[in-house]
Image (cartoon, coloured by chain):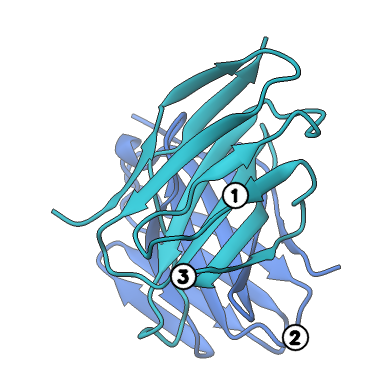
Chain colours: A cyan, B blue
Amino acid sequence: DGGITQSPKYLFRKEGQNVTLSCEQNLNHDAMYWYRQDPGQGLRLIYYSQIVNDFQKGDIAEGYSVSREKKESFPLTVTSAQKNPTAFYLCASSTEFSSYNEQFFGPGTRLTVL
Amino acid sequence: QKEVEQNSGPLSVPEGAIASLNCTYSDRGSQSFFWYRQYSGKSPELIMFIYSNGDKEDGRFTAQLNKASQYVSLLIRDSQPSDSATYLCAADTGGFKTIFGAGTRLFVKA
């Protein structure tokens, strides 16, 4: 059963802490993405990766870091430098074999800063 | 700044009616356009994509694209209460970058 998994579903962070959000896919997709969604706003791109060991900053990369050591995995770390991290975080993937770059999303992680 | 604009709604339609959702985009270089449905608290689900001018139909859904006017729409025929959700319009601007609109909330009244 192919798909994208994200964990945890809910995450609570104290100020000053770094936290890591997990994203795994078994769709054999090359490209993976991290988005942030705030209430009433569209998805904003944080980072994306087209291939293993390579990734690029999106529009709001400050305070975040990623790694892409395996094709299946693209974890996101929210660092203490991110001043307002409370949001819904969505991981997505897409295949290079489509001309249209349609993206498929995981179930999301809701991060709350206490 | 590349943008995708949508009316936030809410758009309210009676059950069985046609719901019409619209969006405009700023980047004339955009080639592919997507409609995602997002239920409250859930992740977006791809329901349609379109890349050629004109209409594309899939069941009760019809996507329409007019590149000259930079306009994309989604029609939902025979709307059902289960269609109540936020609909996100998105444009692929190339280079693995997709720009999302803020979404239109749709309510289908039984």
* Chain letter belonging to callout 1: A
- Give the farthest residue toward the top: A114
Q: How far across and how far down the image is residue B78, in percent? A: 31, 52
Q: Cα distance, mark 2 to mark 3?
A: 31 Å
Along the viewing direction, whichever of B102 and A8 lies nearer the viewer: A8
**How many other residues sit within 10 Å of disc 2, few (<14), some (14-19) or many (≥20)?**
few
Asked if badge 3 and badge 1 are on a common chain, one would say: yes
Residues at marks 3 and 1 touching, judged by CB atoms closer than 8 Å: no
* Chain letter belonging to callout 3: A
| Quadrant in which residue A19 is drawn | top right
Q: Please state which amino acid type lies under the numbered disc 2.
A: Arg
**How many other residues sit within 10 Å of disc 1, few (<14), some (14-19) or many (≥20)?**
many
Q: Secondary structure at mark 1?
A: strand
Q: Residue at x 33, y 35 (%)?
A: B81
In the rendered view, tell whether residue B51 sits above or below residue A8.
below
The residue to which callout 1 is attached is A35
The residue to which callout 2 is attached is B28
Q: Please state which amino acid type lies under the numbered disc 3.
A: Val
In the rendered structure, the answer to whether residue B64 lies left or right of residue A80 reads left
